[in-house]
Image (cartoon, rainbow, N blue to C red):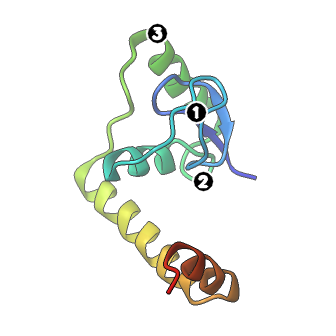
Amino acid sequence: MTQAICFSCGATKFGAFTPCSACATQPETEDQIAVSLLLTDHFMDAATLAENAERIRTSGKQAAVPPEMRDELLQSIRQGSELFAQTPLGDVMTNLMNPT
């Protein structure tokens, strides 16, 4: 399970895109999605995650994602979504979301 930090309140959570149990915020915009992915143990070690969590909690400022990294993160998410859509579970989800 991915350890992550909520981009809104700095609480620890599991999964970059899951709702935060502390503040109920869930990433919705592309910028929020990119920041949420960056604030995981896939991109930061435990100490860096803790530093970012503290900064968000004390200042309310979110982590800034460099533009070139933002584009790379969003491209990875899009590719992952496309691959997921090609799986049997992806077919089921597509049919549920787009009934005919």
Residue identifier under label 1? 49
Query: Vertical placement of 91 versus 50: above or below?
Result: below
- Sort mark 1 into few (<14), some (14-19) or many (20+) by Cα contacts within 10 Å: many
Query: Vertical placement of 99 versus 48: above or below?
Result: below
Q: Helix, strand, or loop for circle 2?
A: loop
Q: x, y (%) of residue 83?
A: 54, 84
User: At x 50% / y 87%, what residue is drawn?
Assistant: 100
In space, the residues marked 3 and 2 are separated at their CA atoms by 24 Å
Q: Is residue 68 left or right of residue 89?
A: left
The amino acid on which the numbered mark 2 sits, given as a three-letter code, is His
The amino acid on which the numbered mark 1 sits, given as a three-letter code, is Leu
Q: Nearer the viewer, residue 9 or 47?
A: 9
Which of marks 1 and 2 precedes in the sequence? 2
Residue identifier under label 3? 58
- Sort mark 2 into few (<14), some (14-19) or many (20+) by Cα contacts within 10 Å: few
Residue identifier under label 2? 42
The number of numbered badges drawn on the structure is: 3
